[in-house]
Image (cartoon, rainbow, N blue to C red):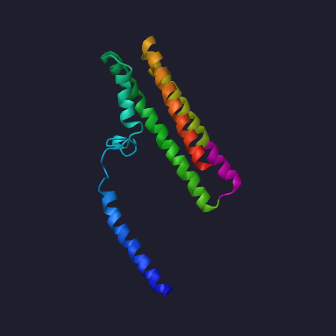
């Protein structure tokens, strides 16, 4: 008797799931309020995606400023790519050493290399940010500060929401 009820309940649940799943999948790819599901978010695998492109509109950059910033990005690209390649190789070497069971001294040396490259990458990012801000007018710098404050406020709200959900 119990097994008959269990089989009947299983059939009902599987039927409900087979009906619900295709209808849920039918909404895939449609725009929604969550930016992670919106079309075009992070296009072409680039970090920043559309948000980075819209910053120029939000700051009302002139054509001359856009060209200057583009030239700066293009000039920095080879160094960024080389640093990225070095960092990838250092991470792979550390992972290979861990897999091979290397001793602590070797792991420490490899992790220090990864750390130094991360620091170098952070410094390059800070220099790029400094060069970006140097191109802006006083009004644009103020608008950038306001955008950053709004972003930080949203970030804190999301953090509080996550923490309250954990409790």
Question: In the image, is residue 103 part of the stretch drawn in magenta?
Answer: yes
Relative side of 38 to 111, left or right: left
Q: Residue at x 32, y 53 (%)?
A: 28
Image quadrant where residue 58 sits: top left
Nearer to the camera, 81 or 156? 156
Residue 77 at x, y = what percent? 41, 32
Instruction: Tell me if I can see residue 137 in this picture.
Output: no
Residue 152 at x, y = what percent? 53, 30
Where is 163 relative to 152, above or below?
Answer: below
Which residue is situated farthest in the top direction here? Answer: 138
Q: Which residues are magenta?
A: 102-113
Q: Residue at x 39, y 77 (%)?
A: 11
Which residue is situated farthest in the bottom direction here? Answer: 1
Nearer to the camera, 60 or 165? 165
Residue 17 at x, y = what percent? 37, 67
Question: In the image, is residue 61 part of the stretch drawn in magenta?
Answer: no
């Amino acid at each position: 008797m119990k097994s008959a009820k269990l089989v009947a309940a299983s059939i009902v649940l599987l039927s409900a799931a087979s009906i619900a799943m295709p209808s849920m999948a039918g909404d895939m790819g449609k725009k929604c309020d969550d930016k992670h599901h919106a079309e075009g978010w992070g296009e072409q695998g680039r970090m920043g995606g559309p948000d980075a492109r819209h910053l120029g509109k939000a700051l009302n950059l002139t054509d001359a400023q856009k060209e200057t910033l583009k030239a700066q990005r293009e000039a920095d690209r080879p160094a960024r790519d080389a640093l990225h390649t070095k960092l990838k190789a250092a991470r792979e070497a550390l992972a290979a050493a861990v897999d091979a069971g290397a001793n602590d001294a070797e792991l420490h040396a490899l992790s220090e290399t990864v750390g130094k490259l991360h620091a170098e990458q952070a410094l390059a990012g800070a220099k790029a940010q400094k060069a970006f801000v140097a191109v802006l007018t006083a009004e644009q710098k103020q608008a950038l500060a306001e955008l950053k404050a709004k972003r930080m406020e949203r970030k804190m709200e999301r953090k509080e929401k996550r923490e309250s959900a954990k409790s």
